[in-house]
Image (cartoon, rainbow, N blue to C red):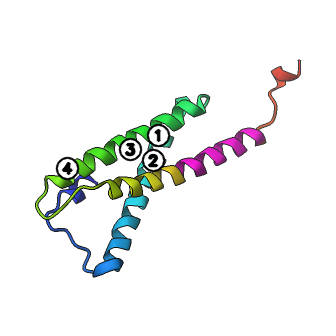
Amino acid sequence: MFYLSGIPHAGLGLEGYEEQILRKSIHVIMYGILTFVLWFSLPKLDDRLFTKMLLCASIPILYAVSDELHQSLVPGRCGNIRGILFDLIGIILVLLWLWRRQKHASKALPASPHAQQ
């Protein structure tokens, strides 16, 4: 992501709204993937769901802010809050999906034999 945001005058070959929609969709997808990968890189935090969600949200958000600052220094590019907002959409959507998935998985687990004694 850092490499792509450093390409001067980067264009996707589209015009107007089509270019903007594609650019913002890429923001959502890339930060969703980053959040997804980060979630599965922290298996030791499965018991502490709130902590895991907080880390999986804050690290990509900090990266999004630094990425927009980086873009503001690249000729022909501009960093702006809208990019961060679209990054945030990807982060939130993936976290909500993973949280629901984790909650349903924990309900489906059978009770431990020690709990019955």
| Disc 1 target residue | 56
Q: Residue tagged by mark 4?
A: 70
Which SS class for mark 2? Answer: helix
Name which of mark 3 and mark 4 comes first in the sequence. 3
Q: Residue furthest top?
A: 117
Q: Which mark is residue 35?
A: 2
Q: Can you tell which of label 1 and label 4 is closer to the viewer? A: 4
* Magenta stretch: helix, strand or loop mostly: helix
Amino acid type, callout 4:
His
Query: Which sits in the foreground, 95 or 46?
Result: 95
Looking at the picture, how far across and down is residue 29, in whole percent? 43, 60
Q: Position of residue 59 (x, y in %)?
A: 39, 39
Q: Is residue 47 above or below residue 17?
A: above
Q: Secondary structure at mark 4?
A: helix
Kindly identify the amino acid type of the residue bearing the numbered disc 1: Cys
State the separation of the CA atoms marked 4 and 2: 20 Å
Question: Which labelled disc corresponds to residue 61?
Answer: 3
Q: Are marks 1 and 2 in contact (CB under 8 Å)?
A: yes
Nearer-N-terminus badge (1/4): 1
Does dot 1 land on a helix, a strand or a loop? Answer: helix
Dot placed on the residue nearer the N-terminal end, 3 or 1: 1
